[in-house]
Image (cartoon, rainbow, N blue to C red):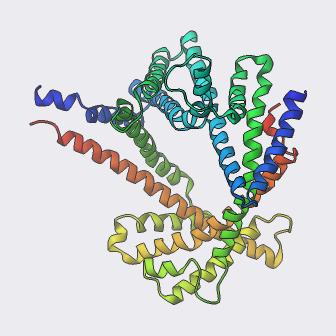
Amino acid sequence: MPAILTWLISWKTLAAILTLAIMSFLYKENPFYRFAEYLFVGLSAGYGFAMTYHLAMKPNLLRPFIIPLLQRIHILGGEPLPINWWYIIPTFFALCYLSVIVPKYSNIIRLPFAFLLGLGSGMAIPRSFQAAILEQLWDTILHPKGYHGYVDMSEKYGWSLTLVVVSAIIIFVSVLAVLAYFFFSKPHKGAYGKFARFGIIILMIGFGASFGSTVMARFSLLIGRLMFLLSWISGFPH
Amino acid sequence: MFLSRTLPMILVFVMGIIGFSLYFIPHPAARQFENTLSQWSIAIGSFAIFLAITSLIRRYINNIKRGKDVFYSIVALVALFGMAGLGLFAGIDEKSLFQKIFINVNVPLDATMFSLLAFYVTSAAYRAFRARNVEATLLLVTAVVVILGISTIGDTQVWLRKTAEWIMNVPNLAQKRGILIGVGLGVIATSVKIILGIERNWMGG
């Protein structure tokens, strides 16, 4: 096959054409962009479905219960698999999703939601308390011996001990100020109001930093795509 | 009424109490039961994808019926069924055609779509970021320092990089931590309301 054809009929060329199709949106919406957009939606949905089937449905429901059950009633053949009858419970809840097909019984769909939501909420209470509150408070508290969570800053960034200590104090006060700002049961007046205003300042600095790093992340993606296009063009046979 | 409201409420309460209690029982049987419940959750949750896929297919079929975006809807449907069929029947291992399509089509499309946001985010920032007051000025200055500090300019201007690092690790960390504590309290409050049946929005109308 001629080199130019090998170059043209390749995954890289396909990826480059689709990249250009998406980028064409910068000019205005056009048929190439729409084609790429719908292709992306379709492929992503298909990918999600296949991955969910293989990684979630098959090991957690089909293999322990549904496949062995179908084998027992001679719908499926093959080496008989052991059946776990307890899995009749998740199978029942999973099949409840199909009730949307019959509008009269569509309310049954609330049962799997209730199972997931109830279990999720129950499990979330202690875990959220541990991870989002206790751990965060523990890392914020100033320790008399050393500075928990900040020691690695001096190692990682070469900060002096003074900077580490000052930073630890700033973090401690700032976290309190942010929490004070979000506490609306007390009017933001007087000294408390000033402290809450300091919280707003910290929030703004944080939002600015988040915005800056988001912009940089997007730009690094853009640079990545441009480099890919350059490498594709440079592969053109001379 | 019982099936549509009372039974889901009882189920939420019972599952909520079980999920909460299991955390405090260190017995191996309880750990085993928790693992089983997690597996069941994954299995039940995974079936929700049928809802998503059904709704997507229904939407595109409606488009085709109404003569709206017919070609694009066919493209999406062919891509959906083709990709799902490949994954289901030909496997999903690393060297499969399924993964090759994902790496060479999905990944570039995804990355390019997100990279386009660079232009829109910059244009939005140009229009929205004006140093009107102290807060807006702080936001603007911080964003500029972080952008310059973590870019190649930061390699030559060390003070800029160090300032950006300090902003990311101190005030930014404090802000995120404050918000996270608030979110944690919110999660706990909402979970308690759901388990006790005070919050019922999840049941729809």
**Residue nearer the viewer, A55 or B36:** B36
Q: Residue A49 location, x and y as percent? A: 53, 30
**Residue nearer the viewer, A175 or A92:** A92
**Residue nearer the viewer, A66 or B205:** A66
From the viewer's perspective, is residue A231 above or below residue A1?
below
From the viewer's perspective, is residue B54 above or below residue A128?
above
On the rendered image, what quadrant is the N terminus of chain B found in? Answer: top right
Q: Is residue A153 left or right of residue B49?
A: left
From the viewer's perspective, is residue B67 above or below residue B140?
above
Q: Is residue B5 left or right of residue B161?
A: right
On the rendered image, what quadrant is the C terminus of chain B found in? Answer: top right
Q: Residue B128 location, x and y as percent? A: 56, 53
- The residue positioned 75% from the left and 39% from the top of the image is A115
Q: Residue B50 location, x and y as percent? A: 61, 27
Q: Residue B114 location, x and y as percent? A: 45, 44
- The residue positioned 56% from the left and 32% from the top of the image is A63
**Residue nearer the viewer, A237 or B57:** B57
Q: How many marks?
A: 0
- The residue positioned 86% from the left and 39% from the top of the image is B10
Which quadrant of the view contains residue A174?
bottom right
Which quadrant of the view contains residue A68?
top right
The answer to whether one can see residue B90 in this image is: yes
The answer to whether one can see residue A198 in this image is: no
- The residue positioned 76% from the left and 18% from the top of the image is A103
Q: Is residue B113 left or right of residue A130?
A: left
Which quadrant of the view contains residue A84?
top right
